[in-house]
Image (spheres, grey):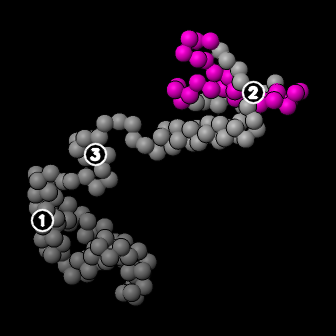
């Protein structure tokens, strides 16, 4: 008999398909209810239909294994897996108050430092872009940002 690739199959599929090249026979092997192994010769069309059925079974098993959730899903487990996790009220209040404190501290800075901090951190401009806009050297922008950050740290302590 010709060697066919070993395939996985559902446990409730009792059939095994074989092809005998020497005599050009298609054979289906299965166990009956008494446990006796039976071999039946079938036509090529029936063999191909059973083969297609077996391949469809494998496709379904692969689909199930790869794409279907296999665990219990509860609200708590979904929350742990969420990308944008909900913020607890305490954390929200702390975050909000910290943001308000930061806003007040930035407003206490001199105008140049305030402007450059806003451009660099909030408008996400590079130091070179800020220097080009204000027609100054990049080192002046770096120095101003460093001084402003030191002042903000002192204010927010």
Q: Earlier in the sequence, mark 3 or mark 1?
A: 3
> In the image, which residues are magenta?
10-36
Query: How many angstroms separate mark 3 from mark 2 (CA)?
Result: 53 Å
Q: Quadrant of residue 142?
A: bottom left
Structural crowding at the residue carrying mark 2, measured as other residues with C-alpha within 10 Å and reported as few (<14), some (14–19) or many (≥20): some
According to the picture, the residue beneath numbered tag 1 turns out to be 101
Q: Earlier in the sequence, mark 1 or mark 2?
A: 2
Q: Nearer the viewer, mark 3 or mark 1?
A: 3
User: Where residue 79 appears, x then y in whole percent?
Assistant: 25, 46
Q: Nearer the viewer, mark 1 or mark 2?
A: 2
Residue name at image x 13 percent, y 62 percent: 96
Residue 155 visible in the picture: no
User: Do the residues bearing badges 1 and 2 touch, measured as CB atoms within 8 Å?
Assistant: no
Residue name at image x 60 percent, y 30 percent: 8
User: Where residue 102 appears, x then y in whole percent?
Assistant: 16, 66
Query: How many angstroms separate mark 3 from mark 1 (CA)?
Result: 34 Å
According to the picture, the residue beneath numbered tag 3 turns out to be 78
Q: Is residue 126 left or right of residue 117?
A: right
Residue name at image x 14 percent, y 57 percent: 92
106, 52: nearer the viewer: 52
On screen, 97 above or below 90?
A: below
55 part of magenta stretch:
no
Give the secondary structure at mark 3: helix
40, 104: nearer the viewer: 40
According to the picture, the residue beneath numbered tag 2 turns out to be 41
Residue name at image x 18 percent, y 72 percent: 106
Residue 1 visible in the picture: yes
Q: Earlier in the sequence, mark 3 or mark 2?
A: 2
Give the secondary structure at mark 2: strand
The quadrant the C terminus occupies is bottom left
Mark seen at residue 154? none
């Amino acid at each position: 008999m010709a060697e066919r690739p070993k395939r996985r199959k559902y446990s409730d599929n009792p059939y095994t398909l074989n092809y005998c090249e020497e005599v050009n026979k298609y054979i289906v092997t299965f166990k009956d209810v008494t446990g006796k192994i039976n071999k039946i010769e079938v036509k090529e069309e029936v063999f191909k239909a059973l083969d297609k059925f077996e391949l469809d079974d494998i496709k379904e098993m692969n689909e199930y294994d790869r794409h279907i959730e296999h665990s219990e899903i509860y609200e708590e487990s979904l929350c742990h897996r969420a990308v944008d996790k909900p913020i607890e009220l305490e954390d929200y209040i702390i975050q909000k108050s910290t943001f308000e404190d930061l806003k007040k501290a930035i407003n206490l800075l001199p105008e140049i430092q305030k402007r450059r901090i806003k451009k660099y951190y909030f408008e996400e401009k590079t130091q070179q872009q800020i220097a080009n806009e204000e027609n100054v050297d990049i080192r002046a922008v770096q120095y101003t940002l460093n001084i402003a950050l030191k002042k903000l740290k002192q204010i927010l302590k």
